[in-house]
């Protein structure tokens, strides 16, 4: 069974640009969550999508957005990039969103560097 | 508000020594608690979870954790460290009442000395 796949794995952008990251969950999983990981802030929850609907959202500015498609694949977008957006962006999938079991399956992440 | 606190951002042990990584939670209602591990350049992997069944939980790779309500703790232990255990470990919590997102602690980086 294939795991969670995130693309691209590495990317470099400049301030002011926008970026789109993609996540393909494990087959059959309907929930996709996104986290930002930085050395200073640790793991911060961005948002969760379930059956194409945003079900939960963290405390990030509106520059951070996401969506989920009918096949459960998800994308997140960051517009007007800032230096502080440099981070590892992790996607996690689960059957129900982890509310019952807390078990999330993580991808290897997309490492974004903003210059 | 729900939260978890991990004491010690870096822990170093000798190979074969006891591993003890500390996690305390703040909640008046026993939450669901988890330990995840992150190896270099990888995503997170679930080690073990507590969901109000047995208070002593056994996980993968010889790790276990004990839920202690009186101490609001969920410390992670392993009797004998192996070089391959070097990684970052995250304690995480979900409150049953809120059905909320998984919230992670700040992580503890474990180094294993030969």
Image (spheres, coloured by chain):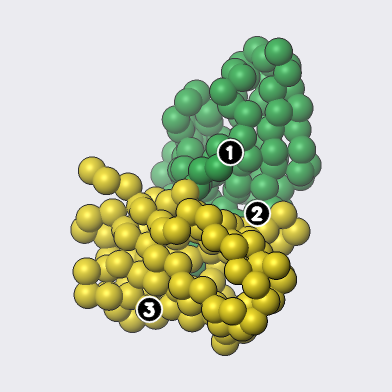
Residue A86: where, in percent of width, then height?
66, 64
Can residue A62 be seen here? The reply is: yes
Residue A60 in the image: above or below residue A25: below
Q: Which residue is mark 3?
A: A67
Tell me the crowding category of disc 2: few under 14, some 14 to 19, or many 20 or more residues within 10 angstroms, Cα based: many
- In the figure, the shade used to draw chain B is green
Instruction: Please say if the residues under marks 2 and 3 sit with CB atoms less than 8 Å apart.
Output: no
Mark closest to the chain's N terminus, 1 or 2: 1
Q: Are marks 1 and 3 on the same chain?
A: no
Q: Residue at the spot x=28%, y=54% of the render?
A: A26
Chain of the residue under the numbered disc 2 shown in the image: B
Q: Real-space Cα distance between discs 1 and 3? A: 28 Å
| Residue B105's disc number | 2
- Image check: A47 left or right of B89? left
Most foreground residue, A11 or B18: A11
Mark count: 3
- Image check: A67 left or right of B29? left
Quadrant the C terminus of chain A occupies:
bottom right
Residue B10: where, in percent of width, then height?
77, 38
- Image check: A56 left or right of A38? left
Q: Which residue is mark 1?
A: B40
Q: Residue at the spot x=47%, y=43% of the render?
A: B45
Q: Real-space Cα distance between discs 2 and 3? A: 26 Å
């Amino acid at each position: 069974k294939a795991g969670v796949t995130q693309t691209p794995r590495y990317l470099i952008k400049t301030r002011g640009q926008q970026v789109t990251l993609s996540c393909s969950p494990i087959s059959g999983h309907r929930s996709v969550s996104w986290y930002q990981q930085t050395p200073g802030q640790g793991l911060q929850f961005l948002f969760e999508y379930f059956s194409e609907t945003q079900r939960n959202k963290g405390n990030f500015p509106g520059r951070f957005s996401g969506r989920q498609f009918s096949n459960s694949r998800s994308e997140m977008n960051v517009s007007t990039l800032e230096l502080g957006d440099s981070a590892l962006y992790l996607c996690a999938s689960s059957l129900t969103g982890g509310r019952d079991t807390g078990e999330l399956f993580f991808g290897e992440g997309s490492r974004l560097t903003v210059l | 508000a729900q939260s978890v606190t991990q004491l010690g951002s870096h822990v170093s042990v000798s190979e074969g020594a006891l591993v003890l990584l500390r996690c305390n939670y703040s909640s008046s209602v026993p939450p669901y608690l988890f330990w995840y591990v992150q190896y270099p350049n990888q995503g997170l992997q679930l080690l073990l979870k507590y969901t109000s069944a047995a208070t002593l939980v056994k996980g993968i790779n010889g790790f276990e954790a004990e839920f202690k309500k009186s101490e609001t703790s969920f410390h992670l232990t392993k009797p004998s460290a192996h070089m391959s255990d070097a990684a970052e470990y995250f304690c995480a919590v979900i409150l049953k009442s809120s059905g909320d997102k998984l919230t992670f602690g700040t992580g503890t980086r474990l180094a294993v000395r030969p």
